[in-house]
């Protein structure tokens, strides 16, 4: 977490000359974050190397969310040639840590997070690219590309056809903004009780059930089946078959991504989340709407390859 060499000059141009640059966080991508401190003023520096990350979608979605009245970080300065963006600092009250420290706050915070989605889904997606069949298939394919080799298996035929069958109607829904990574580690508690949104640069126009899955089938923390059911009821009218289908698709993708982070990127810590993700996936696959995909998994992924005990290897 050494700051990029261009950071001091960038901060000088932005009026933050002499500010301290402190490590804040990295994530599963090539992006890194630093806290910038000068006196009592604070901001967040996002380092998104242009060779690996395109920050223009982040700026577009941030503007879209702001226009709708949602709390995305304000953009204080930017230099896309260097991959540097200075953001409003939302502080340290991240939902994941808050509910871990104060479990009694879990339900009201999740209720507020559901309300954000319900409000967001009242608006159109503002010319975002579509979450179409090609994207769904590419994401699901990460499972056969990365997870199966990690457990010593080869992909059998019919994987894409099975997903085609269950995603056929969903892939045509492009009516809401899908943030795509809406979960407890990407939501901040702000003064006054508002929720701050982070990590939305991959947003697409898609189905309203997707971000509900992101929140309620969280790969990084346990969300009880009781809380999941209560929050779905709070959201209101929703195609539960679509929720199960998108849950299965997202969790299949995540299993592949976490295996890739381990094998390709040298980030083994994500492997500890695999058993939880398998639990969600097994539950989703039990829905009748997932029959073709469930049959493929039953034929090609034995139970011993599902529990992720291979992590220790």
Image (spheres, grey):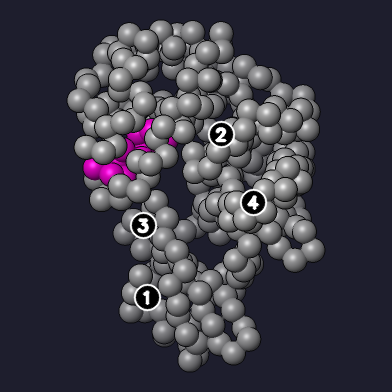
Secondary structure type for disc 1:
loop
Classify mark 1: residues with Cα within 10 Å, few (<14), some (14-19) or many (20+): some
Residues in magenta, as a range: 253-263
Secondary structure type for disc 4:
helix
Q: Nearer the viewer, mark 1 or mark 2?
A: 2
Secondary structure type for disc 2:
loop
Q: Nearer the viewer, residue 282 or 124?
A: 282
Mark sitting earlier along the chain (3/2): 3
Q: CA distance from mark 4 to mark 2?
A: 16 Å
**Mark 3 in CB contact with mark 2 (< 8 angstroms):** no
Q: Nearer the viewer, mark 1 or mark 4?
A: 4
Mark sitting earlier along the chain (3/4): 3
Q: Nearer the viewer, residue 117 or 164?
A: 117
Q: Which mark is residue 261?
A: none
Classify mark 2: residues with Cα within 10 Å, few (<14), some (14-19) or many (20+): many
- Quadrant location of the C terminus? top left
Please say whether residue 128 is visible from this viewpoint: no
For disc 4, the marked residue is 99
Mark sitting earlier along the chain (4/2): 4
Q: Which mark is residue 30?
A: 3
Classify mark 3: residues with Cα within 10 Å, few (<14), some (14-19) or many (20+): few
Residue at 24% from the left image edge and 45% from the top image edge: 264
Q: CA distance from mark 1 to mark 4?
A: 31 Å
**Location of residue 212 in the rendering, given as x and y in whole percent from the top left corner:** 63, 34
For disc 2, the marked residue is 217
Mark sitting earlier along the chain (1/4): 1
**Mark 4 in CB contact with mark 2 (< 8 angstroms):** no
Q: Which mark is residue 3?
A: 1
Q: CA distance from mark 3 to mark 4?
A: 28 Å
């Amino acid at each position: 977490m050494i700051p990029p060499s261009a950071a001091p000059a960038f901060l000088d141009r932005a009026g933050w000359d002499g500010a301290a640059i402190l490590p804040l966080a990295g994530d599963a991508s090539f992006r890194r974050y630093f806290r910038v401190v000068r006196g009592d003023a604070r901001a967040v520096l996002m380092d998104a190397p242009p060779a690996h990350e395109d920050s223009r979608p982040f700026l577009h979605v941030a503007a879209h969310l702001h226009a709708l009245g949602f709390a995305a970080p304000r953009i204080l300065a930017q230099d896309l040639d260097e991959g540097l963006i200075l953001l409003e600092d939302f502080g340290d009250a991240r939902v994941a840590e808050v509910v871990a420290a104060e479990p009694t706050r879990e339900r009201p915070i999740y209720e507020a997070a559901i309300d954000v989605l319900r409000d967001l889904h009242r608006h159109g997606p503002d010319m975002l690219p579509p979450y179409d069949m090609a994207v769904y298939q590419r994401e699901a394919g990460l499972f056969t590309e990365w997870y199966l080799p990690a457990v010593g298996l080869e992909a059998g035929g019919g994987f894409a056809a099975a997903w085609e069958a269950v995603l056929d109607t969903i892939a045509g829904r492009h009516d809401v903004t899908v943030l795509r990574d809406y979960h407890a580690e990407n939501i901040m508690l702000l003064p006054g009780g508002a929720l701050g949104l982070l990590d939305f640069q991959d947003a697409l126009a898609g189905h309203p059930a997707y971000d509900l899955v992101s929140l309620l089938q969280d790969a990084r923390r346990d969300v009880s089946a009781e809380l999941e059911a209560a929050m779905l009821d709070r959201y209101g009218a929703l195609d539960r078959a679509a929720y199960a289908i998108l849950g299965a698709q997202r969790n299949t993708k995540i299993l592949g991504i976490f295996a890739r982070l381990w094998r390709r990127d040298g980030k083994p810590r994500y492997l500890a989340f695999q058993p939880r993700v398998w639990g969600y996936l097994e539950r989703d696959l039990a829905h009748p709407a997932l029959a073709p995909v469930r049959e493929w998994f039953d034929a090609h992924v034995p139970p011993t390859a599902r529990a992720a005990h291979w992590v220790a290897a």
